[in-house]
Image (tube, rainbow, N blue to C red):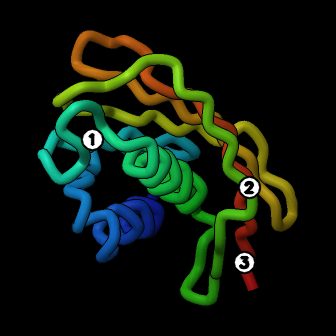
Amino acid sequence: MTDMSLANTERITAENFATELGIELVESRHDYVKVKLPYDAKLGVGRIHGGAISALIDVAATAAFWATPLVNPKSMGATVGLTVNFLKIAVQADLWAEATVRRRGRTLCTANVTVTDEQQHEIAIAVVTYKLTHE
């Protein structure tokens, strides 16, 4: 991955909302990102809130979409579709999300995201569609 692609990915994971949740960039390469959401009681005591897991998914996918040399200073993007299937309750656990871009169209991109806990149990799976322009 180019230095610019890595910088774009780091920029996404360092935005205010991602940092408020505590999301950390673990790994990044072309069309792939792995991020971590460390457990904090604000995410849910009895179980981690589905909204926090969905936000983790969206941040991971967005960073993966920006992990390309096609992105330039004029690039803009937004999530246009997010489908999440929750498979297992996560209780007081760190979570990891791995996002892989499945297809890059002219403006629409699609990614698969898997969320796991420290025992590698699948907590959620998702498909994310994103509009990314490279003007």
Give the labeled residue for mark 2.
81
Quadrant of residue 15 within the rendered picture: bottom left
* Residue 132 % position (x, y): 71, 69
Q: Which mark is residue 83?
A: none
Residue for point 55% across, 86% down: 73
Q: Position of residue 85 (x, y in %)?
A: 61, 29
Q: Position of residue 94 (x, y in %)?
A: 20, 32
| Residue 71 lies in quadrant | bottom right
Tell me the residue at 56%/35% (across/down): 113
Residue 20: % across, % down: 23, 67
21 vs 79, left or right, is: left
Which disc is residue 36 wearing? 1
**Residues at marks 1 and 2 touching, judged by CB atoms closer than 8 Å:** no
Cα separation, mark 1 vs mark 2, equals 22 Å
Q: Earlier in the sequence, mark 1 or mark 2?
A: 1
Give the quarter of the figure containing the C terminus.
Answer: bottom right
> Mark 3 belongs to which amino acid?
His
Of marks 1 and 2, the one in the foreground: 2
Q: Is residue 102 left or right of residue 6?
A: right
Q: Give the total number of marks visible in the rendering.
A: 3
| Res. 134 mark | 3
Amino acid of disc 1: Lys
Q: CA distance from mark 1 to mark 3?
A: 28 Å
Q: Quadrant of residue 48?
A: top left
